Image (cartoon, rainbow, N blue to C red):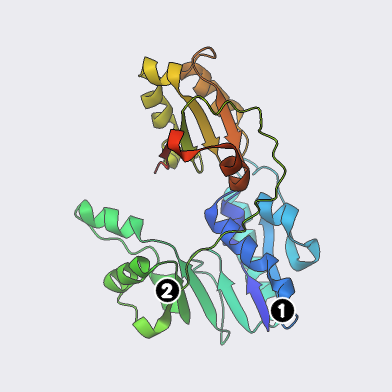
Amino acid sequence: MRIIYDYKIFWSQKYGGISRYFINIIKNFHKNKNIDYKIIAPFYQNSYLNYEIDKKKIFGLYMKKKIPKTLFLFKQFNKFFFKYSVHNFKPNLIHSTYYNENINKKKIPLIVTVYDLIHEKLAKEKGYEIFPKYKSLMMADHVICISKKTKEDLIKFYNISENKISVIYLGSDHALSSPNKYEGLNQDKPYILYVGSREKYKNFQFFLEGYSLSDRLKMDFNLVLFGGGKLSNKERKIISDFITPHHSNIFIFSMFPLMIKNMSCKNCCCFGCS
């Protein structure tokens, strides 16, 4: 079987759960010699793809940083070359990485994975309706949902046939043997754990503002950031504006196994901001 993955999530996400999901799937293909695959991502910024996948399996060029004022150009380039390259590879299956409406699949079966319907549900709560996944779902030959609840919501909002949907739960890479390089972390002091991306839409700045309003939190709790990559200069500036060094220690973990080997959840308060 020959499988193609598109560029969509690898262009939009440097780090994150969805790109990690696809990378972990792809990394397991070596267990089945009957599967051949290609990732067509003419330009991509995803670190997992760049460092963890055989470059021979990637059609594309890694960009460490996006070039300002050129995003539309690169987006169009990705679209064009994906359409051009798909049929040269002659795949038996296309698995879209994130609601790609520009796949010219012709007779090739297309799979789409749906994680949640947050946008649709929030819009309905505010009194209007949106259906951002409609075109992608109508193009798909089969849909993977990561939970039964997601499946129920998908049927409710998009009236997708139940026969077209499979529920496949998320897993983990379980890399518990990773070297422990955070043993100096003081675990006697309780901590607040922030999980995930710190992009603007995740409200990381609001989280820091709320944290900074409490002298007790700043004095008595460490702040631990998991995921989201290294702190940018802008993020460091935001942190310095709200939190003085003598108040709190801030630790950053990029790998979940390293984090859980160092911390006891009995001293943890966890935030995943949206």
The image quadrant where one finds the C terminus is top left
Q: Is residue 212 left or right of residue 78?
A: left
Residue behind mark 2? 137
Residue 41, how many percent across, how many down? 67, 62
Q: Is residue 59 left or right of residue 69?
A: right
Residue 17, how many percent across, how many down? 53, 54
**Residues under numbered marks 2 and 1 in contact, where contact means CB atoms less than 8 Å apart:** no
Residue 147, how many percent across, how many down? 40, 67
User: What residue is drawn where x is 49% and y is 72%?
Assistant: 112
Q: Is residue 265 left or right of residue 258?
A: left
The answer to whether one can see residue 140 in this image is no
Q: Residue furthest bottom?
A: 107
Q: Secondary structure at mark 1?
A: loop
Q: Residue furthest left?
A: 127
Q: Name above or below for residue 232 compared with residue 154.
A: above
User: What residue is drawn where x is 42% and y is 43%?
Assistant: 272
Amino acid beneath label 2: Leu
Residue 211, how many percent across, how many down? 39, 25
Q: Is residue 214 left or right of residue 255?
A: left
Q: Secondary structure at mark 2?
A: helix
User: Which comes sooner in the sequence, label 2 or label 1?
Assistant: 1
Q: Name above or below for residue 31 compared with residue 43.
A: below
Q: Residues within 10 Å of mark 1 (few under 14, many from 20)?
A: few
Amino acid beneath label 1: Asn
The image quadrant where one finds the N terminus is bottom right
Q: Name above or below for residue 122 compared with residue 191.
A: below
**In front here: 230 or 76?**
230
Residue behind mark 1? 32
Q: Name above or below for residue 258 compared with residue 37.
A: above
**In front here: 272 or 7?**
272
Distance from disc 2 to disc 1, alpha carbons, whole Å, reads 28 Å
